[in-house]
Amino acid sequence: MIRRVNRPLFRPAVAAIVACLFGLTAVVTTADAYTGPVESANARYVVATYQQLLGRDPDDASLDFYLGKVAAGGDTSRQMIAEALLYGPEASAREVDRAYRKILERPAEPGGRIYWTNHLQVYDVLDLRVLLFSSDEYFRRAGDTNQDWVRALYLDILGRNPETAGLRYWTAEADRGTERALIVAGFYLGRESLGRRTDDYYRLVLQRPASAVERAAGASVIAAEGERSLYARLWASDEVFEQFFDAVWSP
């Protein structure tokens, strides 16, 4: 089981804590999904938020609860709702599943899934990814040598083959005994990775590329607060919300 047993690499997600303080913890229920009419922009937005962030429709109680929050007004309320769902147990478990499948190409073991689901409700997902990329299991899958491992990091984190100088530098760092977690963090928190992840969220949420200014701002948000914070900000934006004024939209 791959677990963190010492202190987290990164500070707690402040946005998630604020959401909890305001009573915006994610509503988890086994009730039937909402099947009634979706007649207002606010209702359409809440239904779409569940579909986007949790992959399912809300139940009646959740829809009513979050409708009240959206009705409070503005993108601040929408952002807090998105953060509450993203840092809730259901979305956190989905994040764990995605990380294990993408990085180790297998499901998480039950104990690890429970541990990391709890962890991600407070701390950044980067903690989990760094631990998986620096694990012995990933190292062996990459080829069981420092150079093969560094090459795999370039492909999996930056989406490209390494340049000669970069491959030589990071391999030398690993050879001299630098902790793998520190090397992985160097990749993940580098300008290229931050910009690439910003672009990914703009395409996912807004279906368009980020401008240079937006890319720089998004990279700063990810570095300071974590990528789920950027995800919540984009999904709460007026650019997303305005589409739900269209009466022909349907879930």
Image (cartoon, helix red, strand yellow):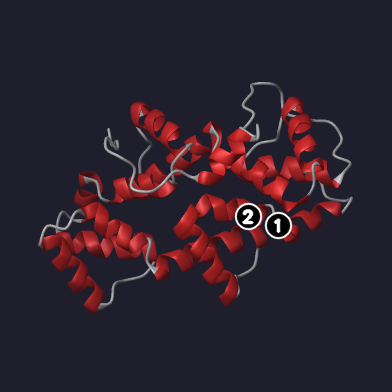
Above or below residue 32? Residue 87 is below
Report the residue at 79% width, 37% height from top. 67
Q: Position of residue 244 (x, y in %)?
A: 81, 52
Report the residue at 20% width, 61% height from top. 148
Gap between marks 2 and 1 measured at Cα: 6 Å
Above or below residue 21? Residue 11 is below
Would you call the spot at circle 2 few (<14 residues within 10 Å), some (14-19), or many (20 or more)?
A: many
Under circle 2, the secondary element is helix
Q: Is residue 183 left or right of residue 121?
A: left
Is 91 in front, or is 212? 212
Task: Check contact, mark 2 vs mark 1: CB within 8 A.
Answer: yes
Q: Circle 2 sits on which residue? A: 233
Under circle 1, the secondary element is loop
Is 204 in front, or is 143? 204
On residue 144, the disc is none
Look at label 2 and name its amino acid. Answer: Arg
Would you call the spot at circle 1 few (<14 residues within 10 Å), some (14-19), or many (20 or more)?
A: some
Q: Circle 1 sits on which residue? A: 237
**Residue situated furthest top in the rendering:** 31
Q: Is residue 161 left or right of residue 23?
A: left
* Residue 209 sits in quarter: bottom right
Q: Is residue 176 left or right of residue 115?
A: left
Which quarter of the figure is the C terminus placed in?
Answer: top right
Q: Position of residue 104 (x, y in %)?
A: 32, 45
**Residue situated furthest left in the rendering:** 176
Look at label 1 and name its amino acid. Answer: Ser
